[in-house]
Amino acid sequence: MKVCTRLKHLTGRFRGVSWGCILLGPALATALGCLLILPDDDTITILSWNIENLFDAVDQGSEYHQFTSAGGWTERDYHRRKERIAQALQALRPRPDIFIFLEIENREVLDDLMDRHLVDVHAPYRVFAKGPGAAIGIGVASRYPIRDARTHLARAGEFPPLRPVVETRIDLAGTDLVIFSNHWKSKRGGAPATEPLRRASAQLLAARVEQLYREEPDLSLLVAGDFNERPLEFELSGRSYPTALMPARELLALARELAAGEGNHPSWVTPEWIREGDHLIWDSSAREAILSSSLLDRPVFVNLWEDIDAPGSFYFINRWERIDSMFLSPSLFSQDSALRFSAFSVPCPRDGCDSRGRPLSWEDDPRGVSDHLPLLLTLIRSP
């Protein structure tokens, strides 16, 4: 049974269209459209992975040229790509229950990968979305029922709609988890020049998070994906321009300086920008995030990179970068929560790394899988 919704909505200051296609099992026939799936154990594992341009062999007009028949892309190439990705996924441990795929062409590709190449993985609940005329989008496949799905499209000035932020509400055996899957604008064209586009996505996302917390203060949230900037982007760029991802400590320090009349701040550093700016705020622990949220009067997430030794998920121009991230709501670290954090890792998938542990792009080496490493999050359900 296929249930599709198309909803017009106003989210905070942003007008957009939310829509989602949710594939539900045939046993679903309840009035609420909900099928309860009981886990095999108390853990739930979530994968987020930019799998680097997975295109089928059907020309539809929106592809990048190298993935068209005129560009030399064939059915055999497509099949090999799926096989490489499937082999890497099947070797991952723990085995994911929820898959977030970035840079996938369409819903048919998502279904083809899951149904024909990951046949021992049961993830029948699926959502796919991409922007108007876009070549690539975001696919989500879940073992657990997706109760609601929305696609949020941000705009920035005269630019076309940006890549979507995909919101899915997943029923984890009676406990809701809302996941925001992201693929923000790349730095192609220069980091400062493209930063307003990433800030537009962050502003839309932050507004939706605030709306959800007003309605459901205890809701568990995960923000995941390829953000095309590092959580420490503001500091690493010399604090020379506002960034979409902002450490809470930086905002609090700026707020204190403004209140004391200290410092020589750029014009964009204002109390209003700190209070309502176009950024997603993070802190290094649940305790600090709760305190920062109280001081800033805005939601603050926990950055999972803070307690891990892995150098990054992406290797570019001789350096590691942490542009793929996962951010959790502080409630997921409470011992009293029905769902709580257990582990976070950045594994090297089978044949997916070179001898130095760097991601091996399939475009650079036929043995490779993707130019990004996957992120794996494990949550644990309270008995």
Image (spheres, helix red, strand yellow):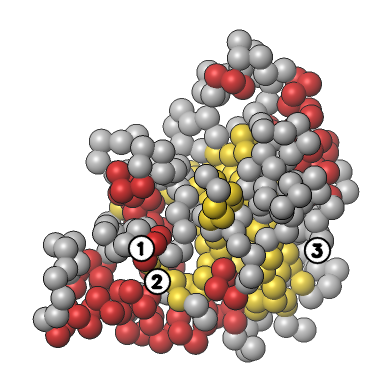
Q: In which quadrant is the C terminus drawn?
A: bottom right
Local packing at callout 2 (Cα closer than 10 Å; few below 14, some 14-19, many 20+) is many
Question: Seen in the image, is 315 located left or right of residue 295?
Answer: right
Rendered residue at 57%/70% (across/down): 304
Of all residues, the one furthest to the left in this rendering is 261
Q: Residue 205, percent across and down?
A: 41, 58
Q: Residue 284, percent across and down?
A: 50, 77
Q: Amino acid at mark 3?
A: Pro
| Contact? badges 1 and 2 (CB < 8 Å) | yes
Q: What secondary structure is marked by label 3?
A: loop
- In this figure, which residue is indicated by the disc labeled 3? 94
Q: Nearer the viewer, mark 2 or mark 3?
A: 2
- In this figure, which residue is indicated by the disc labeled 1? 234
Residue 340 in sight in this render: yes
Q: Amino acid at mark 2?
A: Pro
- In this figure, which residue is indicated by the disc labeled 2? 247
Earlier residue among tags 2 and 3: 3
Earlier residue among tags 1 and 2: 1
